[in-house]
Image (cartoon, rainbow, N blue to C red):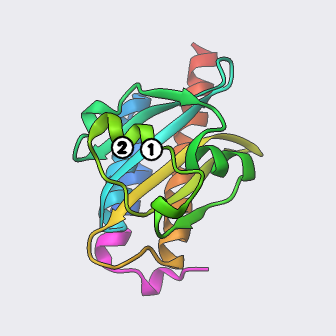
Amino acid sequence: MISTKNLPKETLSALVEASAAINDTQDLDATLEAIARAAASVLKAEASSVIILDRARNKQVFRAAVGDRADQLIGVEYEEGVGISGKVTQLGQATIVHDVSKDKHHYKDIDVRTSFHTRSLVAAPLIHRGVILGVVEVLNPVSAERFSEEDRVLCQLFANLAASAMAKSQHLDRIQ
């Protein structure tokens, strides 16, 4: 468990901003983008995304992305069980992949499509009441050689925030 006493001020500020975004807006896309932005900032990474599951169509869909080429990702879809994100949603566990070129689950088509080079990533499932809704992925650490166990825990925290935002949005949609 990470103690807040050990977290830098900028990390705590980003967490507070991301959690406030859930309460301040009814725009799910803006909230998920704020969470992706905070995750990339806190984990000091080149990029981050929120990928949601569209179970009715058995697809994963990029719903939010920040970083170089992020605009090319929004709305991109691929099969539900594909990629490291597919593995994370199937297992329901956060993971770190230090070298994606050596991981058989890495879905290279996304990198090819965007001309982005993913070297390593940390990914965590969005889980609300036992249901997996998607994944937060954070790519390519900037200030370190690799992601740490603390980064994995922080990524899961951002995934939890994204899951809460999605659950709130779904609840509001049902009320309306």
Give the residues drawn in magenta, as a range.
Answer: 1-12
- The answer to whether residue 24 is visible is no
Few, some or many C-alpha atoms within 10 Å of disc 2 (few <14, some 14-19, many ≥20)? few
CB under 8 Å between callouts 2 and 1?
yes
Quarter holding the N terminus is bottom right
Residue ID at (34%, 63%): 140
- The answer to whether residue 148 is visible is yes
Q: Farthest right residue? A: 130
Please name whichever residue, 124 or 168, is drawn nearer the observer in this view of the structure.
124
Q: How many labels does the image show?
A: 2
The residue pinned by badge 1 equals 108
Q: In this view, does 73 lie above or below 107?
A: above
Labelled disc at residue 68:
none
Q: Where is residue 107 in the image (x, y as percent from the top left)?
A: 50, 44
Q: Where is residue 69 in the image (x, y as percent from the top left)?
A: 24, 40
Q: What element carries label 1?
A: helix
Residue ID at (53%, 29%): 78
Labelled disc at residue 111:
2
Q: Position of residue 157 (x, y in %)?
A: 54, 61
Q: Where is residue 72 in the image (x, y as percent from the top left)?
A: 28, 31
